[in-house]
Amino acid sequence: MVVSGLMNTARKGCCYSTGSVRAFTTSTPNRAAVLSLYKDLLRAGNGFSDYNLRSYINRRVKTDFRKNQSISSDEKIAELYEFGQDQLQMAKRQAVISQLYKGQTSVMENLSSKV
């Protein structure tokens, strides 16, 4: 009963805010801010307990940043930076959940610990 009540209030938007709603700013993030976001995303990826998720997230972050490296439009950079911030918050939340509900260790993790 309590859970369904919270779900109803969450649907109405009165329960709490996750902070994902931000005012759009037209200022372009500087190079240091983008590099900081890159490092934070890699750190968040390393927070997962599952080897496959860790390697997937780190690989995806690296390829996406390389793919978007040549973008010079200020609006597009600001849009991608906001998207990256949202993805960072989601990755942090998912990493906590991953630590709470650990699965079996991967064969790859067993190999890396023996080396």
Image (cartoon, helix red, strand yellow):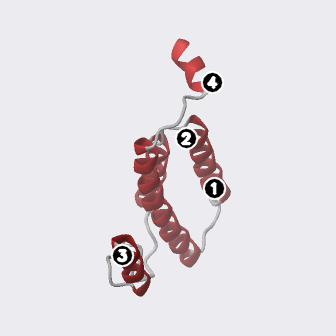
User: Circles 1 and 4: CB distance less than 8 Å?
Assistant: no
From the image, tell me which residue sits under label 1: 64
Q: Give the vertical position of 67 relative to 45 (above or below).
A: below
From the image, tell me which residue sits under label 3: 6
Viewer-proximal residue among 33 and 95: 95
From the image, tell me which residue sits under label 2: 54
User: Circles 1 and 3: CB distance less than 8 Å?
Assistant: no
- Callout 4: helix, strand or loop? helix
**Side of 59 relative to 92 (left or right):** right
Q: Earlier in the sequence, mark 1 or mark 3?
A: 3
Q: Give the vertical position of 20 relative to 32 (above or below).
A: below
**Side of 27 relative to 105 (left or right):** left
Question: In the orientation shown, which residue stands out farthest toward the front?
Answer: 1
Q: Which of marks 2 and 1 is nearer the N terminus?
A: 2
Q: Position of residue 56 (x, y in %)?
A: 62, 44
Spatial separation of the CA atoms under disc 4 and disc 2:
14 Å
Q: Which residue is drawn at 42% across and 42% down?
A: 99
- Callout 1: helix, strand or loop? helix
Spatial separation of the CA atoms under disc 1 and disc 3:
36 Å
Q: Give the vertical position of 94 relative to 115 (above or below).
A: below
Spatial separation of the CA atoms under disc 3 and disc 4:
40 Å
The amino acid marked with disc number 2 is Arg
| Mark toward the viewer: 4 or 2 | 4
Q: Residue at x 65, y 61 (%)?
A: 70
From the image, tell me which residue sits under label 4: 107
